[in-house]
Amino acid sequence: MSTEIEAQGVAPGVDVRTQGTRGSYLIGLGYAVILTLASFWASSTDVIYAPGVPILLAVLAIAQMGIHLVFFLHISSAPDQTNNILALAFGIFVVGLLVFGSMIIMAHLNHNMMPMDRLMQMQR
Amino acid sequence: MSAAEQALVTADAVPLSLRGPAPKRVVAGYGFWLFLLSDIVIFAALFAAYAVLSGENAGGPTAAELFDKKHVLVETACLLASSVTCGFGSLAVQSGDRTSTYFWMAVTFILGATFLSLEVGEFSHMLSIGAGPSRSAFLSAFFTLVGTHGLHVTLGLCWLIVMLLQVATLGFPPMVRRRFFSFGLFWHALDIVWIGVFTIVYLGAHL
């Protein structure tokens, strides 16, 4: 098994170092619960400056996705995981282009569009 | 360990071009990882649609009126707990322990089914008050995004039943282990998508 890993890399989800322990899953669960409760709290509290809440929620969500990747999917920066990390990086790149690209384009179109009542008048 | 095996272990002993194909376990896992990433790209497109359309409610009910945070917190807890029990289940598969595989995977199934029934309940309530997918662009985007996630969970539950039947009939040959392993990746990836759903759709509605 170790021969295979040294020669060919490992599949995603395989963590050679922590295989066979429940510890990593429980640690991951602990972090995930804290981050989930934090984001539910942040969305309903008055303590935080209101315009900053969406950014805080985004940070908490991205942190929790990272926790899930590391503790549940066992993605790490180990040299034998290069393929998995590269695929993940490309996936994140495409997701970012899709989401932020759509939002920027649609906001721009919205901004340049004639107000709806004027448009209705012209169609008469 | 023989001398030949020893030579393989040292990193540069055999050039990459002479090492031969990777073992099936690695190839299957990597292929499934690529599938999951492309699935996440589909969800990204639906998220983009939701982000653009979430304010376009055509005079119908708004997100803040429709969504209940406590309900979502229970759904999130179910999915998170099922992710961890699925992890315990895959550890049991790795050690070839049939009893604890059945136990943890049954718990995973029950938690997943609870999540799904909560979601179906929410959908049918929304339909009954006239907030169906045809009401406004916001609701179309909502039902497409959350419904696609729910469909993935449904397929995951069917897959889990098939895997348990395979354990019952075939035991733990490498083939079954590979499939269980892919199922674990699938289930954890669904949980990652759900983080985006509850943050953007449900918590974002109350900002």
Image: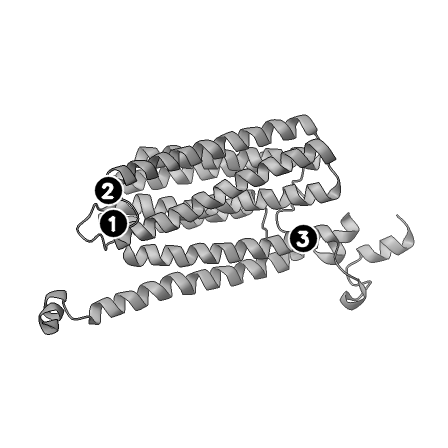
What label sits on residue B28 in the rendered view? 3
Give the secondary structure at mark 2. loop
* Residue A42 rendering spot, x and y as whole percentages: 30, 41
Residue at the (27%, 52%) spot, across then down: B138
Q: CA distance from mark 1 to mark 2?
A: 7 Å
Q: Amino acid at mark 1?
A: Arg
First along the sequence among labels 1 and 3:
3
Q: Which residue is mark 2?
A: B130
Instruction: State which chain disc 1 sits on.
Output: B
Q: How dense is the environment of label 1, judged by Cα within 10 Å: few (below 14), some, or many (20 and up)? A: some
Provide residue B189's location: percent of width, then percent of height.
51, 47
- Going 33% across and 53% down the picture, which residue do you hit? B141
Indicate which disc, 1 or 2, sits on the residue closer to the N terminus.
2
Q: CA distance from mark 1 to mark 3?
A: 43 Å
**What is the chain letter for disc 3?**
B
Residue at the disc numbered 1: B135
Q: Which-is-in-front pick, marks 2 and 3?
A: 2
The residue lying at 80 percent from left, 57 percent from top is B10
Q: Residue B77: tell me if it is visible.
A: no
Q: Is residue A124 visible?
A: yes
Q: Are marks 1 and 2 in contact (CB under 8 Å)?
A: yes
Question: Residue A33's quadrant in the figure?
Answer: top left
Callouts 1 and 3 on one subunit: yes
Under mark 3, the amino acid is: Ala
Asked if residue B71 lies left or right of residue A85, the reply is left
- Of residues B150 and B48, the one nearer the viewer is B150
